Amino acid sequence: MSGRPVPSRRTVLYSAAAVSVTGLGAAACGPGGESGVAAAPTAPVDLGAEKEVAPGSVKLYRDHNVVVGRDEDGALKAYSTVCTHAGCAIDRLEEDRLVCPCHGSEFDPRTGEVLHAPATVPLEELRVKASGGRLVAGPGA
């Protein structure tokens, strides 16, 4: 015998469960996780052809963390798709809402407003313009 107390089965199982749950949280929301901590554009970004966003529609640009909407009159609006709750990249546009994969926050892609918590702050609005048949978004756009 080593003289050290032997942990109970309950203690071993509890510790294993706590480590597993903690590890899952880090993978989902931490840097380097599947979604990771994302960043909004820090300079103008060419998103592609202007015609990709028809009047009355929205388009999610996952690679740039931007969503662009165009109202029926043709006016453009853009928002960062970095969740204001934990900084995760929002990678799903489901009908009329953006859904964050980390904690389930939901946002209106046309207004940036929060539709479902835990986020409480709207998405950051970005400048957007059409130039030469291309959409450009971000600071200085």
Image (cartoon, rainbow, N blue to C red):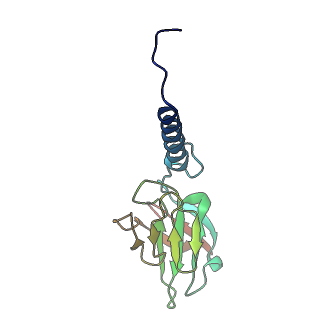
Q: How many marks?
A: 0
Question: Image quadrant of residue 136?
Answer: bottom right
Front position in the image: 106 or 38: 106
Which residue appears farthest toward the left when viewing the image? 120
Please name the residue shown 44% across and 54% down the image: 87
Which residue appears farthest toward the bottom when viewing the image? 73
Q: Position of residue 18 (x, y in %)?
A: 48, 40
Q: Position of residue 28 (x, y in %)?
A: 54, 50
Decide: is 7 above or below 50: above
Q: Position of residue 91 (x, y in %)?
A: 58, 63
Front position in the image: 4 or 116: 4
Decide: is 11 above or below 127: above
Please name the residue shown 46% across and 13% down the image: 4
Question: Image quadrant of residue 64?
Answer: bottom right
Front position in the image: 87 or 12: 12
Please name the residue shown 49% across and 91% down the image: 73
Q: Position of residue 32 (x, y in %)?
A: 56, 42
